[in-house]
Amino acid sequence: MRYQSIILPLGTLAMGVTAQVSSQGSAIFQLSNDTEFAFMLEATLSLSNNFGANTGEVLRAASQIIPGDFESWYREFIFLANRIHDKAEAINAKRFPISAREAYFRSATYYRAATTFLYANISDPRIYSVWDSALKDFDKAISLLPVAGERVNISAANFTVPAIFYSAQRSINTPGNHRQNPFNSTKRPTVIVGNGYDGSQEELYHTFGRAILDRGWNFISYEGPGQPTVRRQQGLGFIPNWWEAVTPVVDYLTKRHDVDADKIGLIGYSFGGTLAPLAASREHRLSAVMAIDGVTDLFGSIQSQFPSNINSVFESGNKTEFDTLLLSLVDNTAVPTQLRWAIAQSLWAFDTPSPYEWLTRLRKFKVDQTVANDIHCPVLVNEGEDDSLAPGQAREMVRLLGSKATYNLFKTDLGAGEHCQLGAESQVAQVAFDWLSDIWEGVSVPHNITGGVY
């Protein structure tokens, strides 16, 4: 899942509007008339592209969920997760490993989905127990891969980075791909992938991992402070010095015999489109970075759309008044779901009860000219034509990076204009990984590849 915009709901508050924001005119068919439910359903459905969900299962759940009703969302997804889990458990995994693996992947997805709207009450035990079920089923699934995924805990300065390493296929000459492997057959290129504001590393297997492995490269996912498992197991919120999460992963990779240390790429997904460039400004062993999508200043995007009364309170430093104002919205069912969820998720992810503290800390996450100057490798910056999270910021990142950047705009008419090109993962993989292959092979790439260079 990805952090969706809270800008529009905040704007409605300035006009005294509390009804759900209409989804009419959306470029993508909406599965709920609650815009946030529709977005999260789309995020879950998109995982069906790579065995993380089934369309019929998600569409059935969508048909039963009451818009804006958080418990209804939980009930439908926990029901689905439990039923698919039971199917997985009933399969003889030794005889039918593919059947068992695919069922466990789906039940893990649905367990994760069930927790989406629980964070307004961080003492809710389901936040932890259901997540544990998701991790257990995901681990069962990756143990049944042709080359089992390997969970590793990597020591960082003041925390542990949980990661999952997936070894490359022995050959990239898979059916339909007859291109000879241009890379060392023993030491393979490796792509590190990190999620954003609310997404897990597990879902990244479906979003990017299979596409990476199909190209004969290693794939490693990870989580840092503020992200789901680190937040749960270590009680840590987001940190702006994100290199402290990425550098230990690079250290780990350079010690492996099957990794080409000269060909390590980093993907940042959603809010990761800020985190990855921040990491690359200090971690110079990376040979390429992909910001999917480019976000330079999430705080600035939010604040620029604040109603004047909210902005005045925040900038005055009146923490008590600001906190009271925003906290009053979280449990108000008349307030748009987008805003209720965004506040609750943010407080959870930053490990603070204070909206003022959340935004004060978020302000430190910024890709500015100094950060851009300190990035030494090529950077692919994606943008979705209809992405409302941080309008214009992908192009601003390209401007800051200058000749180090390659820009690609994904178009709505091909279903790729959403935030992070949600639901069009094959298009993202085509562009990002063909670009990355050219970078690793020393092929010159243009500054703007929009319109079909790849």
Image (cartoon, rainbow, N blue to C red):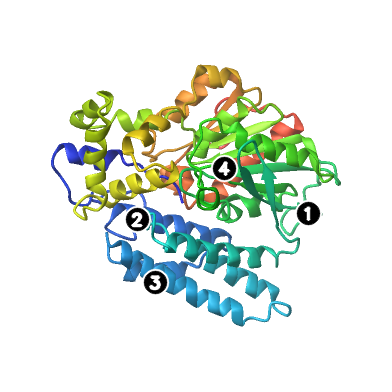
Disc 3 and disc 4: Cα gap in Å? Answer: 34 Å
The amino acid beneath tag 2 is Asn
Does 278 sit above or below residue 105? Answer: above
Write the residue at 53% across / 17% down.
370
**How far from the left and from the top, in percent, is residue 15?**
14, 38
Residue 173: mark in rendering: 1
Disc 1 and disc 4: Cα gap in Å? Answer: 34 Å
Mark 2 neighbour class, 10 Å CA radius: few under 14, some 14 to 19, many 20 or more? few
**How far from the left and from the top, in percent, is residue 18?**
17, 48
> Which numbered disc, 1 or 4, marks the residue that appears first in the sequence?
1
Write the residue at 47% across / 29% down.
365
Is residue 298 found left or right of 174 in the rendered image?
Answer: left
The amino acid beneath tag 3 is Arg
SS under mark 4: loop
Mark 4 neighbour class, 10 Å CA radius: few under 14, some 14 to 19, many 20 or more? many
Between circles 1 and 3, the one closer to the viewer is: 3
Q: Picture quarter containing residue 79?
A: bottom left
List the residue tagged with mark 3.
60
The amino acid beneath tag 1 is Asn
**How far from the left and from the top, in percent, is residue 298?**
41, 32
Q: How many marks?
A: 4
Disc 2 and disc 4: Cα gap in Å? Answer: 22 Å
List the residue tagged with mark 4.
224
Disc 1 to disc 3: CB gap under 8 Å: no
Disc 1 to disc 4: CB gap under 8 Å: no
Report if residue 172 is visible in the image: yes
Disc 2 to disc 4: CB gap under 8 Å: no
List the residue tagged with mark 2.
121
The amino acid beneath tag 4 is Gly
Between circles 3 and 4, the one closer to the viewer is: 4
**How far from the left and from the top, in percent, is residue 317?**
28, 25
